[in-house]
Amino acid sequence: MSKCALITGITGQDGSYLAEYLLDQGYEVHGLMRRVALENQESRAGRIRHIAARLRLHSATLENYPSVFQVLSKQRFDECYHLGAQSYVTDSFADSFTTMNVNINGTHYLLEGLRQLQPACRFYFAGSSEMFGKAHESPQRETTPFHPRSPYGISKTTGYYLTQNYREAYGMFCCSGILFNHESPRRGFEFVTRKITNAAVRIKLGLEKELRLGNLEASRDWGHAADYVRAMHAMLQQSKPDDFVVATGQTYRVRDLCELAFGELGLDYHDYVRTDPGLNRPADVELLLGDASKAKNQLGWSPRYSFKELVKEMVQADLERNRELQRAAD
Ligand code: NAP
Ligand code: F7E
């Protein structure tokens, strides 16, 4: 009999890649979606439009317990991938209360609902390298102390400890992936990689003149989302629940990303990128670099995409999309 999985955040970047991956593995895939997204699938569920007919979508929000409880009462799941969150660090400074509510309480509601109704369901929590924040050592591994630098980082650190506590207190199969930044052509436009690849393309096509960015010296360990969802799945197939860092082991500055993305289009980023102090965060994370040795040794996981291949794919996808938009406007 095929396994049944629930994905929260199925309309997001990772949710869409994970849904595709689980369908390919023969899973019955269910997704938790906000009512507004369920009702406006054309505009709000673009990342899963191509597979929507093969999914079972449930209306719910992570903002209240009855909503989550209702979904868990209707259907039995073998695995639950909890990806739903307010995931944009800048927004978490602007509205820390919503971030805390969705990310901390949403995780707690789901864990408690599973404990009450389906304690045998395996649980994946989308932890983040933002938990390391002002990192105490480099590279960062599972044993590196947390020092979050934003409300988002704090919310993910709390979610990590909630997940650990349900594992230890109730013997549930709960894992956290500590995932470093991962991107793709499906990345939201607010994140720096997509902001850069899309702007570089629009400048190349004469649709925009410049790109305004904040901190160009911040360094990140950037991988591809399609690689990272394989690691999420592998964690829930282990004989014992555990936590894993997922990263490429290479770090680049935002400036390097600009050079590569603009270079891909034959442009020099110095001619177009302007720094805007208004885009700096109240506290930023300067350098992240992950050591994924544990995931490599225990899960047999390693990334397939290089940073250059990732940026090239994103630039090419944005080029195609913007050309289509231009054609449609003509
Ligand atoms: P994303 O594209 O921002 O997707 C977030 C998802 O959460 C969307 O489906 C969104 O639904 C849903 N969501 C937000 N608020 C919700 C609410 N109140 N109730 C129900 N659903 C809600 O994020 P992602 O990049 O795929 O990341 C997936 C997860 O991994 C997140 O938890 C993120 O924090 C974490 N993470 C991401 C990275 C990364 O580099 N991508 C790294 C480490 C950890 P709508 O479509 O309705 O907005
Ligand atoms: O910023 C700098 C910014 O917003 C990366 C989320 O998926 O990964 C992501 O969080 C860096 C930061 O990602 C702009 O200051 C400069 O240093 O793309 P980002 P993030 O904050 O690293 C982690 C692992 C998650 O878990 C999160 O959910 O780029 N930066 N100028 C800028 N960033 C943005 N967004 N926009 C700028 O104009």
Image (spheres, rainbow, N blue to C red):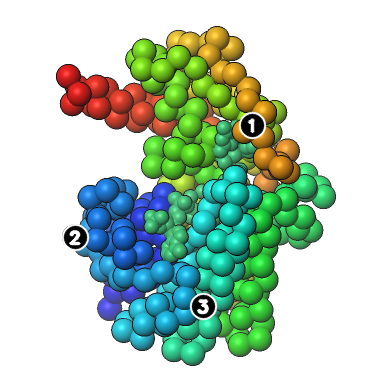
Q: Position of residue 109 (x, y in %)?
A: 51, 78
Point 75% across, 58% down: residue: 146
Judge by depth and name the residue closer to the eye, 261 or 142.
Answer: 261
The crowd level at tag 2 (other Cα within 10 Å; few <14, some 14-19, many 20+) is: few
Q: Which residue is mark 1?
A: 278
Q: The N terminus appears in which quarter of the rendering?
A: bottom left
Answer left or right for 106 relative to 70: right
Q: The C terminus appears in which quarter of the rendering?
A: top left
On screen, 164 above or below 198? Answer: below
Q: Amino acid at mark 1?
A: Gly
Q: Which residue is mark 3?
A: 109
User: Mark 2 or mark 1, which is nearer the start of the sequence?
Assistant: 2
Q: Secondary structure at mark 1?
A: helix
On screen, 193 above or below 282? Answer: above
Point 36% across, 28% down: residue: 318
Q: Position of residue 312 (x, y in %)?
A: 44, 27
Farthest bottom residue? 116
Instruction: Between label 2 and label 3, give the one nearer the viewer.
Output: 3
What is the spatial separation of the Cα atoms under label 3 and label 1, in whole angstroms?
A: 36 Å
Instruction: Between label 3 and label 1, give the one nearer the viewer.
Output: 1
The crowd level at tag 1 (other Cα within 10 Å; few <14, some 14-19, many 20+) is: few
Q: How many marks?
A: 3
On screen, 89 above or below 19? Answer: above
Q: Position of residue 188 (x, y in %)?
A: 44, 42
Give the numbered dot on residue 53: 2
